[in-house]
Image (cartoon, helix red, strand yellow):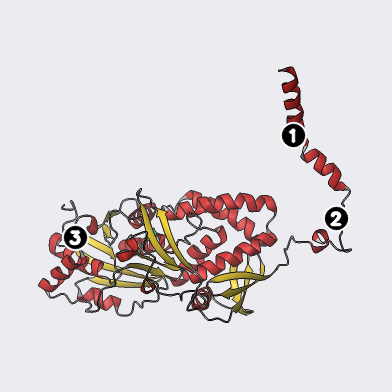
Amino acid sequence: MRIEGIDGARIALAFSGGLDTSVMIRWLQENYNAEIVTVSGDLGQEKELNGIREKALSLGAVAAYHVDLKEEFVRDFAFHALKAGALYEGSYPLATALGRPLLGKALVEVAQKENCTVVAHGCTGKGNDQVRFEASVWGMAPDLRVIAPVRHWEFRSREDEMAYCAERGIPVAATKASPYSIDENIWGTSIECGVLEDATVAPPEDAYQRTLSAEDAPSESTTISVDFANGIPIAINGESIEPVELLRKLNRIAGENGIGRLDLIENRLVGIKSREIYEAPAATLLHFAHRELERLTLDRWTARYKEQMSANYAELIYTGLWFSPLREAMDAFIDETQKRVTGNIIVKLYKGTMRILSRSSEFSLYDQALASYTSEDSFDHSAGEGFSKIFSLPLRTIARSKEKASITL
Ligand code: ARG
């Protein structure tokens, strides 16, 4: 189906360098006489973006941007999700979902600078990412036109796209295509398609990109210490380290110990259930450590309330509503709670498992004198009698009323 109203337009395209968006440059030029400006965002993915500008220009783009978003991604997106304890459906650390709004923002900035009236992305019509891109772009630039050629074009398979390239002499990587669809950034990797579509099949080892299996992980455990300041990790094994480097380091250490693999059936925004494999070694370790520190430093009521908010925050990120007033309001609440989340956590990593070894904080609410069962005990035991009596009063009242009722019946 033809896309109306974009003939001759100047289009900012989110360009990953993969087959779809490479074909897209040529397809938009050929069918719509469009001028393409590409935008490639570096979110700390291991796959280097070296030469991506040259690639876009050689495919016919009139301008090509390669923007370094790593630092912003970690500080302003991933660490917000960490502080919020945001895990979608209780498990997925949301790496892909967190990357989209920032890529959308970069796309809008280039579009405005380059006088593009249209932005384009490579997402399909049945995924979450189209919604995240579009909600993010329109949340910032309500009048920009957004198109998704994959929802319209004639290609039904990778082979169709390869044939299109071959006919036009467009060079495509000769390497054998991975059977998987992989999206990756410094917060985690998402892997789907191929044999993974069968929910009864365990992921083959080659589906994993950045973690060892528990079986292949070293048989010696690794002990790691993480310092947090206001909910944010600032040092590893006692050494201060910048956010991007910190994640790189933890991804490597946790990945080598088999930490961070996830095999999930999840509810997509568009209504279907999908099966996705995730690898998020650093994010998994950090969520674990951060939660342990909150157990120590948050009071009971704040912790309970924040737990509800974690689920809502994750839902908001997953559904693409990052640039919303609700997210900002939640961040304000979360930042208030994080004023106490400063301290040290030591974790033992061993063949895919994590164990807490130590927690400490200047804001610790754990009072050993109150908790102790030794002669150090400072708890007022006699107060327990009155407390217990008043606390159980409603249940006694109910029991008495039941007794009375059965007598009069
Ligand atoms: N299911 C994940 C999400 O919605 C990842 C989507 C992209 N996955 C991929 N393998 N390309 O955030």
Image vertical order of residue 66 relative to residue 339, above or below: below
Gap in Å between the C-alphas at discs 2 and 1?
26 Å
Which amino acid lies under the numbered mark 3 shown in the image of this protein? Arg
Q: CA distance from mark 1 to mark 3?
A: 65 Å
Asked if the beta carbon under badge 3 is closer than 8 A to the nearest atom of ligand 1, the reply is: no
Q: Quadrant of residue 174?
A: bottom left
Question: Is 238 situated left or right of 404 in this image?
Answer: left
According to the picture, the residue beneath numbered tag 3 turns out to be 156
Q: Secondary structure at mark 3?
A: loop
Q: Secondary structure at mark 1?
A: helix
Write down the residue under mark 2: 379
Q: Nearer the viewer, residue 120 or 126?
A: 126
- Is 24 left or right of 233, judged from the image as shown? left
Could you tell me residue 205's position as x and y percent?
Answer: 39, 73
Residue 286 in the image: state x and y as whole percent.
56, 68
Q: Residues within 10 Å of mark 1 (few under 14, many from 20)?
A: few
Q: Nearer the viewer, residue 236 or 258?
A: 258
**Mark number, residue 394:** 1
- Quadrant where the C terminus sits is top right
Q: In this picture, is 150 found above or below 261?
A: above
Q: Residue at x 75, y 61 (%)?
A: 366
